[in-house]
Image (cartoon, grey):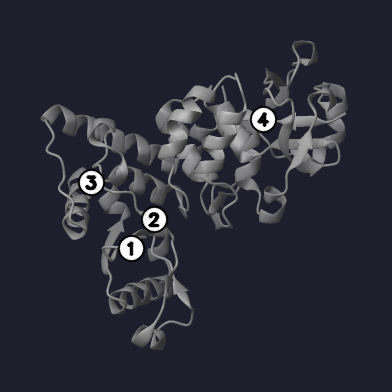
Amino acid sequence: MAYLLGYGTAVEWLRHNTNTALLSERYALPPLSIEASHTKLQRHAQAIMDLTRPLHLVVSMRDSRRPSSITKCHLFAPSSFTFNAVRMDRGIFCCGPELAFVQMGNLLDEERLLMLGMELCGRYGISPAGTLFEREQTCTPEVLRQTAMELGRVRGKRKALLVAPRVLAGAASPMEAALALMLHEPPDRGGFGLRAPELNHPIPVEGTARKYWDFDTITPDLLWNDERVAIEYDSDAHHLASARIAQDALRRDVLAELGYRVITVTSKHMNAPRQIERVASIVASSIGQALEPISDEQWTARVAYQTRLRRYATNPTELLGFS
């Protein structure tokens, strides 16, 4: 018998994990093998030690639900009757990011689910202390969509199918994800409606730029490659280290040498709606796209949307759905 962590507990464990190879390996877990006994769960104290209580467990049959003071059981029975899971320890598993995304569709509104999708398809994790770390991407928006399609009738599927096509892969931080959504989401959702950027997409370093850069590629934070336009996001944390300041300046110089227009966005820009509007106008002009005019009411809604995205980016625990 095995335990299967799901919902917010799964998201919490997935975001904390630094082992990309572990996250990429999946196990087919038959539903009849899943249990929720509080007593037996204590055997896995080490694996679940740092996770928020109550632990959210997934079961496939109503009779299997055994909630306790530290567990909450969710009935989740996909039509395939096989759970795609990541092995945490002997006898304990975690839903993969694609299953967790669908499950969270039952708990989160569309905006928060979209930010969660950006995280699950991103290139970063978040430690228990709240610091970011780099890691390889382990999921894609297409996998999110395809998984939801294949699950049959389960809670969260409808919202997951609405949101998954809007997820942009490859963000290296929650704030990069928020910035990309501010620029790309359509005006009726609070964005500027710009064509979707590529996030952290590698560009070959060629010609004279090779003299300044020690690597074969360079990866701008946001990129419109056909128009040779890039955005580099500089957070306050970056500016605390002089070495990082120099590296960021060199990145911009190399991109310029390669013929890219580089637009720098800082955390101060992210907190000033007029500054974000200025960035959007520069990008729109650079990629040959006109911004749609909006009313005063739409402007107010846009500012509120940006405020919410910043809040989710700076407080990612809001994406866990714990109650």
Residue projecting furthest to the top: 63
User: How many angstroms separate mark 4 from mark 1 (CA)?
Assistant: 38 Å
Q: Amino acid at mark 3?
A: Ala
Q: Please tell me in which quadrant of the rendered image residue 42 appears.
A: top right
* For discs 2 and 4, the disc positioned in front in the rendered view: 2
Where does the image place residue 51, in percent across and percent down from the top left? 68, 36
Q: Amino acid at mark 2?
A: Glu
Report the quarter where the N terminus lies. Answer: top right
- Asked whether the residues under the numbered discs 1 and 2 touch, taking CB atoms below 8 Å apart as contact, a structural biologist would say yes
User: How many angstroms separate mark 1 from mark 2 (CA)?
Assistant: 8 Å
Name the residue carrying label 3. Answer: 272
| Sequence-first disc among 3 and 4 | 4
Where does the image place residue 112, in percent across and percent down from the top left? 44, 32
Q: Is residue 103 visible?
A: yes
* For discs 3 and 1, the disc positioned in front in the rendered view: 1
Where does the image place residue 241, in percent across and percent down from the top left? 43, 69
State the SS at label 1: loop
| Sequence-first disc among 4 and 1 | 4
State the SS at label 4: loop
Name the residue carrying label 1. Answer: 225
* For discs 3 and 4, the disc positioned in front in the rendered view: 4
Name the residue carrying label 2. Answer: 198
- Any mark on residue 278, and which? none
Residues 314 and 208: in front is 208
* For discs 3 and 2, the disc positioned in front in the rendered view: 2
| Sequence-first disc among 2 and 4 | 4
| Sequence-first disc among 3 and 2 | 2
User: How many angstroms separate mark 3 from mark 2 (CA)?
Assistant: 24 Å
Q: Amino acid at mark 1?
A: Asn
Residue drawn at x 44%, y 41% as measured from the top left: 167
User: How many angstroms separate mark 2 from mark 4 (CA)?
Assistant: 30 Å
Q: Is residue 70 visible?
A: no
